[in-house]
Image (cartoon, helix red, strand yellow):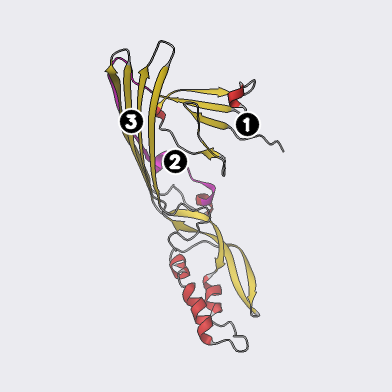
């Protein structure tokens, strides 16, 4: 096995690393990028943190001419392929999915040859249909029915067994999806074999992202610039949890 140090990422020379999970702290819209630099060795002292690639992204600024653009990137399920989980569910085509990345930008001079501005906004909603989530092992329909016949231990009231069955009642919604079970086996509960199997439960994971960037550049001298940049990244995710298996349940 070959291991490498994670890349070190900066935006306009400022740190952009979430050190807890080694991913970028902020996600940049491509239209906000003027250029990027990738260094793989022989770093200067300012890049002394990691031994992996050094990636520095430079954001866009205004110029002496007013310039802007508008974009709309549209994706549907017809542009996607089936995942391995979806193939395992015997799907013949990807679940319905739409995504619109709609945005606009504008830049120009505040004081010609001296002060410039640039601003950008993007609205990015993703609306997927319910699709199989992560793999989970649960009782099959027959296994769930058998739970009602599990004998009680001495001194254990029947209400305790019923409370467990009530908490597991959401599995009826899973069974209504006609899930496909695999690698079946029995697990003993108080001596009663309960059939379980692996399956994938359909979940819906919509999200809405808002991105805004504003930047002002002022030329102090021919060799010195002063830059003020504000970047706002609002993310609203639904059901985006690493151990999610049953949607809202």
Nearer to us of marks 3 and 2 is 3
Nearer to us of marks 1 and 3 is 1
Q: Say which residue appears at 64% left-offset and 72% top-offset.
A: 187
Quadrant where the image shows the C terminus = bottom left
Q: Which residue is at the front of the view, 33 or 94?
A: 33
Q: Which residue is mark 1?
A: 50
Q: Residue 145 location in percent, x, y?
A: 52, 77
Q: Tag 1, which secondary structure?
A: loop
Outermost residue on the right side: it is 1
Q: Say which residue appears at 68% left-offset and 36% top-offset.
A: 3
Q: Residue 210 location in percent, x, y?
A: 35, 40
- Callout 3: 10 Å neighbours few (<14), some, many (20+)? many
Real-space Cα separation, disc 1 to disc 2, in angstroms? 36 Å
Residue 191 falls in which quadrant of the image?
bottom right
* Range covered by the magenta-colored residues: 61-85
Q: Which residue is mark 2?
A: 80
Check if residue 83 falls in the magenta segment.
Answer: yes
Real-space Cα separation, disc 3 to disc 2, in angstroms? 28 Å
Real-space Cα separation, disc 1 to disc 3, in angstroms? 31 Å
Q: Is residue 180 above or below residue 111?
A: below
Nearer to us of marks 1 and 2 is 1
């Amino acid at each position: 096995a070959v291991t490498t140090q994670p890349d070190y990422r900066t935006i306009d020379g400022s740190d952009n690393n979430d050190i807890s999970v080694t991913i970028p702290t902020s996600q940049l819209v491509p239209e906000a990028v003027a250029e990027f630099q990738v260094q793989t060795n022989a770093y200067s002292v300012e890049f002394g943190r990691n031994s992996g690639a050094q990636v520095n992204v430079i954001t866009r600024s205004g110029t002496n001419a007013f310039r802007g653009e508008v974009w709309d990137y549209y994706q549907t399920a017809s542009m996607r392929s089936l995942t391995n989980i979806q193939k395992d569910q015997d799907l013949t085509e990807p679940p319905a999915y739409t995504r619109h990345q709609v945005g606009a930008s504008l830049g120009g001079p505040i004081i010609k040859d001296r002060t410039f501005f640039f601003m950008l906004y993007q609205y990015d909603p993703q609306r997927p249909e319910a699709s199989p989530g992560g793999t989970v092992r649960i009782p099959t329909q027959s296994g769930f029915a058998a739970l009602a016949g599990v004998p009680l231990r001495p001194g254990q009231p029947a209400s305790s067994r019923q409370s467990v069955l009530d908490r597991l009642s959401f599995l009826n919604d899973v069974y209504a999806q006609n899930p496909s079970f695999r690698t079946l086996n029995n697990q003993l509960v108080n001596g009663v074999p309960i059939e379980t199997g692996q399956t994938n439960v359909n979940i819906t994971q919509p999200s809405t992202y808002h991105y805004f960037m504003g930047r002002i550049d002022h030329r102090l001298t021919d060799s010195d610039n002063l830059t003020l940049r504000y970047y706002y990244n609002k993310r609203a995710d639904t059901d985006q949890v690493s151990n999610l298996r049953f949607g809202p349940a």
